[in-house]
Image: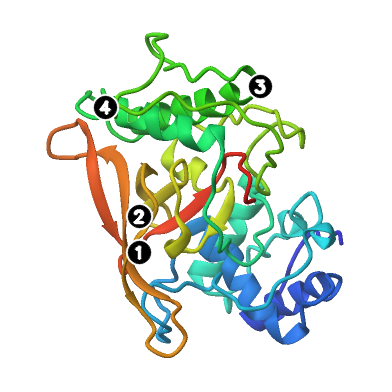
Amino acid sequence: MNVQVLAASAVAAVIGCLFIVVAAFSGVSNSSGEQFFNCQCDSAIGPDPSATTTTTAGSTPCDSDEEWEPSDVPSTNPLVSMTVAPGETEISDYHRACMSAIASGAPPLQTPALRNANTGFAVDCSRELAYAQVGKQAGGPDAAQGEVIRDLVYAASAAVPTGRCIAPADGTVSGSTGSASPSAQSGYTMPTGSCAQTADQQTAVYLPNTVAGQALCGQRVRLGAVSPGDLVFWDYRDNAPTRVGIAVEHTRVTATDADTGEFVAGLMRVVAVDPATGEFTLLDVPSDSDARAKRVLAGAAN
């Protein structure tokens, strides 16, 4: 699909173009097109501030019960080639910002958010490296926290083929939590769009150095399935996250649906910068905030 200019008279026309894309994937109906389009925007720039409809607490437009086969998902996001005509006035500012971010950042096409916890060497390594960062100064605002997260993710992903979990700054082997160093294993797969340079499962992940840039990478994760190594973004302003943390524990579930047992609410423990002190610290991010989670590391459950 090659759409150079999207001169839609309304958002519905934008969504209509997505129907063509979605219909090409087996198991996804045209009726799901609007939800998946909203999932692309929600993943790229965060929640729509003008949205008036609400769903289950802790859920997002990407938490769909419908799935499609990974083999049916293109390797690149076909929405990247879409642009909105400058004179188009009927599309919302949010969707215009969404299409602009997708066109410039070329994020991966998002499938329904992952439900499984991630496991594996890179996951364990990222947890150790993140815990070792607690108490250290970030060195500055957005760029500094983004650079540290980038370096930790790179070190954890690069450790998979070597079997050695080494901190990127001082070269010391991790183990800050008192646990044994992770053991190398095989059989890991990369989540879709992890910002790796190739599809090779051994490829190291090198993220952008800004929080907003990192938010475009990776595959969406249900907030109830967040695992160590997953990135949690929150405090969205002007269609971009201003804070990022790297998860160090699995989501602590605090509420489930009485009828289905599905996740409703929980806390995601992350290592992130405390704006008050400028230091990396442990934080519990609630799922009922504007938090969004992405998976960028290879693991056994992707």
Q: State the residue position of label 1.
A: 290
Q: CA gap, disc 2 to disc 1? A: 6 Å
* Marks 3 and 2, the one that precedes in the sequence: 3
What's under tag 2, amino acid-wise?
Answer: Trp
Q: x%, y% of residue 96?
A: 56, 65
User: Residue 289 versus residue 144: which sits nearer the camera?
Assistant: 289
The crowd level at tag 2 (other Cα within 10 Å; few <14, some 14-19, many 20+) is many
The crowd level at tag 4 (other Cα within 10 Å; few <14, some 14-19, many 20+) is few
Vertically, is 59 above or below 133?
below
Q: CA gap, disc 3 to disc 2? A: 32 Å
* Marks 3 and 1, the one that precedes in the sequence: 3
Q: Which mark is residue 50?
A: none
Q: Secondary structure at mark 3?
A: helix
Q: State the residue position of label 4.
A: 140
* Marks 3 and 4, the one that precedes in the sequence: 4
Q: CA gap, disc 3 to disc 1? A: 35 Å
Q: Is residue 277 visible?
A: yes
Indicate which label's residue lies in the foreground, 3 or 4.
Answer: 3
Most extreme residue toward the top is 171
Q: CA gap, disc 4 to disc 1? A: 24 Å
Q: Which mark is residue 234?
A: 2
* Quadrant in which the N terminus appears: bottom right
Q: Residue at x 43, y 87 (%)?
A: 53
Cβ–Cβ below 8 Å for labels 2 and 1? Answer: yes
The crowd level at tag 3 (other Cα within 10 Å; few <14, some 14-19, many 20+) is some
* Marks 2 and 4, the one that precedes in the sequence: 4
What's under tag 4, amino acid-wise?
Answer: Gly
Left or right: residue 83 versus residue 20 is left
Indicate which label's residue lies in the foreground, 2 or 4.
Answer: 2
Vertically, is 36 above or below 230?
below
Q: State the residue position of label 3.
A: 161
What's under tag 3, amino acid-wise?
Answer: Pro
